[in-house]
Image: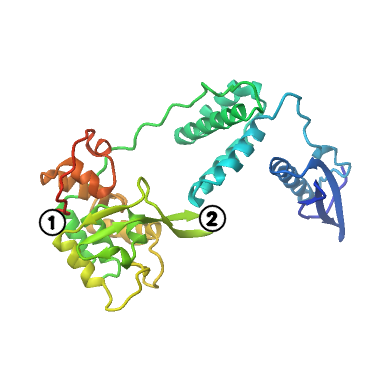
């Protein structure tokens, strides 16, 4: 192998074929990949191009290109990596950008598997179980089985070797650790005059998710009622407002007097319906992660309170409402959960719902 100067190898399509292109010794060079132009082959070529780039920068580039030949596949259909890529391409069309971001993380784990041969499913399954955290192993094995099931239904393979290879589902998160109402009031008192006081009080008083509060617009605050119909999600390009909540399309919440007064005090005399109710000091969308890290947790430490996330404002509301005697099904209707998730049983919902004055 001859030594070569640093460079970057890229992949580009031309006339239905894929080529490698790079610059070496100030000269543009290119080579056939040996692959036709499709989504699966682009992914394969991109991985090989990265290996070529690494070798160029290390000075061990193989100019015969034998080192970068596409691995030959046995006849009989696609391998696990190819099924995964095809399944991902189809599924991405229906995924929110934030979920696509997570699938991108899983894609990295798939590419790092020791084998993509379908007949090595048992070995690969053991590798996943031994080398990955429980929640990643569960999602990864579940989706690999789904990818093979997709390949089976589309006639690409004859059997699904991953049908019964599923990592155990992780145990539920630890029980919520709500604040007492005295702790809640202590926190709000310490925030008096702070830009984010109203936002945090709204979380405490409604039990809504942080993303739903950050996405709330004035057009959805009418009289003594709020309609939650959007949330803030993350994608590779940053944060954005996404229609639909986590578990439902929208949720109408009649307000109690204190929460209504809180919003009335914030409402400008003139404002557009699509203006956000809560913003950052610079007028941007509230970043819950940043708020949790830079304000919330330092404040708890300063007050001598046990460290817990801003999301515990939700469990604080739910716990306090239940302790005040509100029926679990009514609490569930107000916060957008199932009664089973909150209290493990179901019942009818009261007709005249209002947020309890806590």
For residue 68, which numbered disc appears in the image? Answer: none
| Dot 2 or dot 1, earlier in sequence | 2
Which structural element holds mark 1? loop
Alpha carbons under labels 2 and 1: distance apart: 40 Å
Give the color scheme: rainbow, by chain, secondary structure or one colour: rainbow
- Please give left or right for residue 264 compared with residue 249 in the image: left
Mark 2 and 1 residues: CB-CB less than 8 Å, in contact? no
Work out which residue is located at the far front of the displayed protein and give it.
351
Q: Residues within 10 Å of mark 1 (few under 14, many from 20)?
A: few
335 left or right of 280?
A: left
Residue 197 drawn at (x, y percent): 26, 65
Secondary structure under the numbered disc 2 in the rendered image = loop
Quadrant hosting residue 70: top right
Residue 288 image point, x, y percent: 37, 58
- Where, by quadrant of the figure, is residue 273 drawn? bottom left
Foreground residue, 210 or 226? 226
The residue that appears at 76% across and 24% down in the rendered structure is 75
Q: Quadrant of residue 291?
A: bottom left
Which quadrant does the N terminus fall into?
A: top right
Residue 236 is tagged as: 2
Q: Which residue is mark 1?
A: 357
């Amino acid at each position: 192998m001859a030594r070569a100067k640093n460079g970057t190898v890229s992949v580009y399509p031309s006339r239905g074929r894929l080529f490698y292109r790079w610059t070496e010794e100030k000269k543009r060079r290119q080579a056939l990949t040996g692959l036709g132009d499709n989504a699966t082959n682009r992914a394969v070529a991109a991985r090989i191009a990265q290996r070529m780039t690494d070798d160029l920068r290390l000075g061990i580039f193989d100019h015969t290109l034998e080192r970068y030949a596409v691995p030959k596949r046995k006849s009989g259909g696609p391998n696990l990596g190819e099924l995964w890529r095809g399944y991902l391409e189809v599924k991405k069309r229906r995924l929110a950008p934030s979920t696509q971001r997570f699938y991108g993380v899983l894609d990295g784990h798939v590419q790092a598997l020791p084998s993509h041969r379908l007949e090595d499913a048992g070995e690969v399954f053991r590798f996943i179980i031994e080398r990955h955290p429980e929640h990643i192993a569960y999602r990864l094995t579940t989706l690999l089985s789904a990818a093979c099931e997709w390949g089976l239904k589309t006639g690409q393979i004859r059997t699904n070797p991953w049908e019964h290879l599923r990592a155990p589902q992780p145990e539920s998160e630890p029980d919520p650790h709500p604040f007492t109402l005295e702790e809640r009031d202590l926190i709000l008192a310490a925030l008096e005059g702070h830009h984010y006081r109203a936002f945090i009080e709204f979380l405490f008083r409604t039990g809504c998710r942080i993303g739903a509060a950050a996405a709330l617009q004035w057009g959805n605050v009418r009289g003594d009622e709020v309609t939650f119909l959007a949330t803030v999600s993350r994608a590779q390009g940053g944060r954005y407002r996404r229609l639909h909540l986590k578990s439902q399309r929208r949720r109408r919440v009649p307000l109690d007097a204190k929460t209504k007064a809180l919003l009335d005090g914030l409402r400008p005399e003139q404002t557009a319906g699509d203006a956000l109710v809560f913003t950052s000091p610079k007028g941007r969308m509230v970043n819950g992660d940043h708020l949790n890290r830079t304000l919330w947790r330092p404040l708890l430490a300063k007050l001598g309170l046990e460290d817990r996330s801003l999301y515990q404002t939700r469990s604080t509301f739910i716990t306090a409402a239940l302790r005040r005697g509100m029926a679990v099904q009514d609490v569930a209707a107000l916060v957008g959960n199932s009664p089973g998730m909150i209290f493990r049983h179901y019942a009818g919902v009261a007709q005249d719902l209002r947020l309890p004055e806590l």
